[in-house]
Image (cartoon, coloured by chain):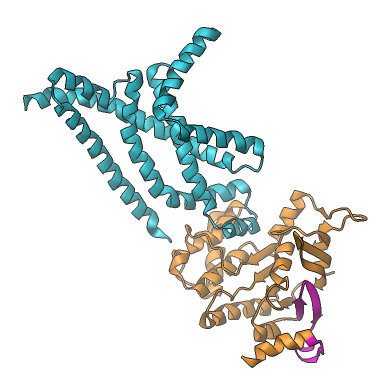
Chain colours: A cyan, B orange
């Protein structure tokens, strides 16, 4: 078991990178997803169509490919255009994850917003509330409750998807575990990494169950 | 001068003409009951006057303000500027058939939200008004309850209180008891009767004939998008010889 004492600090370092990808992706993709959801419901088709196209590309191609495209795409673009701007590895991962997850969140939020009965808008309208007040004080609080179960799915998937960052050599948990697998000539480090993912998701499941119960104060 | 004036109002959904030529007036302090078979356009009329729907022709005047005027020579109707429409909306309240309370807010929060956010009333003032309204509705002690914890009758009384909290000049009711069982209907009707005694101007679309007769100063009978008969309750219920009206009323007296 002396293996474990040297293995754990290494994997912990990778896990911190994993957590950083996870946290930053949620931080950016949830507000962006809300914005995309609202834009997709726009009455103007010049807004609606490009947004639909964006969502369909994000959901229709592998996240792996999107990470590669953002990283190398920005690199080649900067080389050939002479703009001199390209993403480093880590920011490229955050951008790719954020715009990918925003597309999924957007569809969940849109479903939530559209499930609120028309009568809620009409009641707010008759009370003289503005559209902004109606959205933020009446609609959004009710949407939150409705989208929690579906969002929990996405969040838990995201924990595991972070392992895709290794494709552009970001040293997150899975990349480091694989390196150790080669060093130890054993599958054991991968197994430990699996425990990390599992425990993280177990905690998230508990958190979401608590959140659902918390939001259950009304029906 | 009437507080509500409706002249030659027309409304259609696609090819379906729901309101064909509606005209009536209502004075401040009066109660108007609108009766008629399902699909006669009663609710649509209410939704047009409260701006939840737009009309295709005619004139609506609320509290001396022109809400919508007929267009000249076949042109579409002309609605007042947004600012005026909003003023008019703030002087009218609507009680919905299925309450439409805000489920994520407590009873008192339901009553205070709009007065605080829309009218700029102080939080304390709004709470005080809210509590006294709840007392009037016989809902003391329900301040902290959520709508889902209340019976249908209680929910409808909260929604009446919510509308009253905005201090409207006219209160509209769209079949306020249709979603309630007979036992709960009574408690809501009692509240509306009390409001009538306090000289609240009200327009009530209802299927409760006895109530319509007792509470109203004026009754309108609608059928097929027209006003077939209007007048005092005594005239509409007892004296009018109109055939469609007596057919309609006889269906109710049989039960």
Q: Can residue A178 be seen in this view?
A: yes
- Is residue B37 left or right of A202 when viewed as pictured? right
Q: Residue visible at 45% across and 63% down?
A: B146
Which quarter shows the N terminus of chain B? Answer: bottom right
Q: Residue visible at 64% across and 82% down?
A: B208
Taking A109 as reference, is A158 above or below it? Answer: above
Q: Is residue B63 visible?
A: no
Residue placed most toward the observer, B182 or B81: B182
- Is residue B166 left or right of B229 when viewed as pictured? left
Q: Position of residue A183 (x, y in %)?
A: 15, 17
Q: Residue visible at 44% across and 48% down?
A: A147
- Is residue A10 left or right of B159 when viewed as pictured? left
Which quarter shows the C terminus of chain B? Answer: bottom right
Taking A24 as reference, is B16 above or below it? Answer: below
Q: In which quarter of the image is residue A45?
A: top right
Q: Does the magenta stretch include residue B242?
A: yes
User: What span is colored magenta in the figure?
Assistant: B218-243
Residue farthest to the right?
B73
Q: Is residue B204 magenta?
A: no
Q: Where is residue A106 in the image (x, y as percent from the top left)?
A: 49, 40
Q: Where is residue A84 in the image (x, y as percent from the top left)?
A: 50, 9
Residue placed most toward the observer, A91 or B51: A91
Q: Residue visible at 42% across and 33% down?
A: A27
């Amino acid at each position: 078991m002396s293996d474990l004492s040297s293995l754990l600090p290494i994997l912990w370092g990778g896990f911190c990178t994993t957590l950083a990808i996870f946290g930053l992706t949620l931080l950016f993709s949830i507000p962006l997803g809300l914005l995309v959801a609202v834009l997709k419901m726009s009455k103007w088709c010049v807004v609606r169509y490009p947004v639909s196209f964006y969502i369909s590309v994000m959901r229709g191609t592998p996240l792996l490919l999107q990470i590669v495209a953002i990283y190398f795409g920005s690199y080649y673009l900067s080389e050939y255009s002479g703009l001199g701007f390209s993403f480093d590895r880590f920011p490229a991962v955050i951008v790719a994850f954020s715009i990918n997850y925003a597309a999924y969140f957007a569809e969940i939020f849109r479903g939530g917003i559209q499930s609120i009965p028309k009568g809620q808008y009409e009641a707010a309208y008759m009370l003289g509330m503005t559209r902004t007040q109606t959205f933020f004080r009446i609609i959004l609080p009710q949407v939150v409750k409705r989208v929690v179960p579906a969002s929990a799915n996405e969040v838990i998937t995201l924990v595991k998807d972070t392992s895709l960052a290794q494709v552009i050599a970001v040293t997150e948990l899975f990349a480091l575990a694989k390196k150790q697998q080669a060093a130890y000539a054993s599958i054991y480090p991968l197994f430990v990494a699996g425990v990390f993912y599992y425990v993280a998701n177990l905690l998230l499941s508990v958190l979401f169950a608590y959140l659902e119960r918390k939001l259950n104060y009304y029906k | 001068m009437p507080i509500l004036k409706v002249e030659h109002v027309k409304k259609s959904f696609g090819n379906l003409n729901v309101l064909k030529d509606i005209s009536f007036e209502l004075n401040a302090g009066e109660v108007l009951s609108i009766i008629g078979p399902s699909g006669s356009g009663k609710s649509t009329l209410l939704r047009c006057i409260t701006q939840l729907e737009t009309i295709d022709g005619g004139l609506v005047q609320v509290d001396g303000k022109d809400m919508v005027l007929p267009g000249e020579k076949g042109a579409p109707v002309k609605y007042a500027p947004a600012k005026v429409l909003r003023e008019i909306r703030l002087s009218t309240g609507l009680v919905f058939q299925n309450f439409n309370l805000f489920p994520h807010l407590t009873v008192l929060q339901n009553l205070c939200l709009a007065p605080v956010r829309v009218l700029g009333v102080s939080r304390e003032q709004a709470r005080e008004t809210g509590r006294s309204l709840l007392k009037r509705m016989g809902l003391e002690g329900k301040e902290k309850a959520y709508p889902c914890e209340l019976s249908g009758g209680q929910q409808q009384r909260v929604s009446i209180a919510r509308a009253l909290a905005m201090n409207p000049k006219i209160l509209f009711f769209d079949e306020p008891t249709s979603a309630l069982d007979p036992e709960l209907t009574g408690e809501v009707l009692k509240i509306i009767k009390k409001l009538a005694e306090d000289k609240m101007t009200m327009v009530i679309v209802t299927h409760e004939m006895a109530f319509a007769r007792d509470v109203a100063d004026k009754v309108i009978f609608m059928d097929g998008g027209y006003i077939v008969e209007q007048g005092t309750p005594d005239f509409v219920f007892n004296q009018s010889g109109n055939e469609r009206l007596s057919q309609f009323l006889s269906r109710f007296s049989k039960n």
